[in-house]
Image: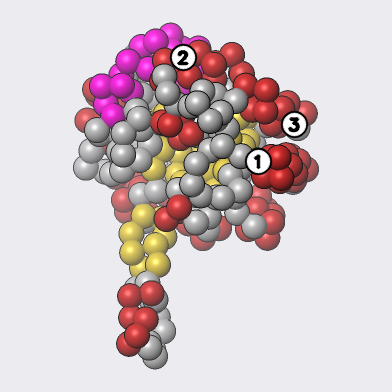
Amino acid sequence: MKRPIIIEVCADSVESALIAQVAGAHRVELCTNLPEGGTTPSLGVLNLARKRLSIKLYVLIRPRGGDFLYNDLEFEIMKSEIEHCGKIGCDGVVIGMLNSDGTVDMPRNRELIEIAKRYSMGVTFHRAFDHCVDFFQGLEDVIQLGCERILTSGGQKTAVEGIPILAQLIEKAYNRISIMPGAGITPENIAEIIEKTGATEIHGTFRSLQQSEMKYKNPAFADEYDFYLSDVERLRKVLW
């Protein structure tokens, strides 16, 4: 018997998170600033999302875009954000720190995980993994840290391009950790990714562009008014 597919929606607003819940998503990863790969949402967004969501809520802990080599100040920020997530009752956090040589920063990731565990939160290791110098050693390191899952595109720009590595990671994981493909997943390619990798969890935005209701639009900024939201119909095509 096949295991059910878990759909996690990457939502960059409370509204998108609520749309995902209505559509039947199993879990939300809440973030902001998706054009830079996602950063930690504001306290107001976090607090309201926790009040309104009944499905599992995981929060991205990432102080900025760019690389995953963080200084001491950024590390302190991340620890504080995990504490806040725990205090308001989030279900989990999404983290990832690397050393400058592309290996997993074991001591500092472990410290973040220890804070999460104090609040009984789960932990996902995010796409910092795709920047590891050695994916398979990275897999063993993240398993040793005690994370629940790894969000990865198989080291490529999109999960479709990363299918060969994703399949190998899932095979080598031996059910010790969940490998969750993400990046560029759509209703049109999700079946191929699941079939060719054996994944049982999938991560995606499944969003669409929303037209602004502004009646006046300054022509100099005509392309800055529209915005993206999770799309109920796109989500329902992938949920089963």
**For mark 3, what is the residue?**
115
Task: Give the spatial CA distance, label 1 vs label 2.
Answer: 24 Å
Q: Is residue 130 magenta?
A: no
Q: Residue at x 54, y 20 (%)?
A: 142
Asked whether the viewer can see residue 113, the reply is no
171 shown above or below 14 = above
**For mark 1, what is the residue?**
71
Residue 34: x and y in percent read 45, 53
Asked whether the viewer can see residue 180, the reply is yes
162 shown above or below 16 = above
Q: Earlier in the sequence, mark 3 or mark 1?
A: 1
Q: Earlier in the sequence, mark 1 or mark 2?
A: 1
Q: Nearer the viewer, residue 29 or 220?
A: 220
Q: Is residue 169 magenta?
A: yes
Q: Earlier in the sequence, mark 3 or mark 2?
A: 3
* Number of residues whose C-alpha sits closer than 10 Å to that of mark 1, classed few (under 14), some (14–19) or many (20 or more): few
The amino acid on which the numbered mark 1 sits, given as a three-letter code, is Asn
Task: Give the spatial CA distance, label 3 vs label 2.
Answer: 24 Å
Residue 28: x and y in percent read 52, 43
Disc 3 vs disc 2: Cβ atoms closer than 8 Å?
A: no
**Dot 3: what SS?**
helix
Residue 38: x and y in percent read 49, 49
The amino acid on which the numbered mark 2 sits, given as a three-letter code, is Gln
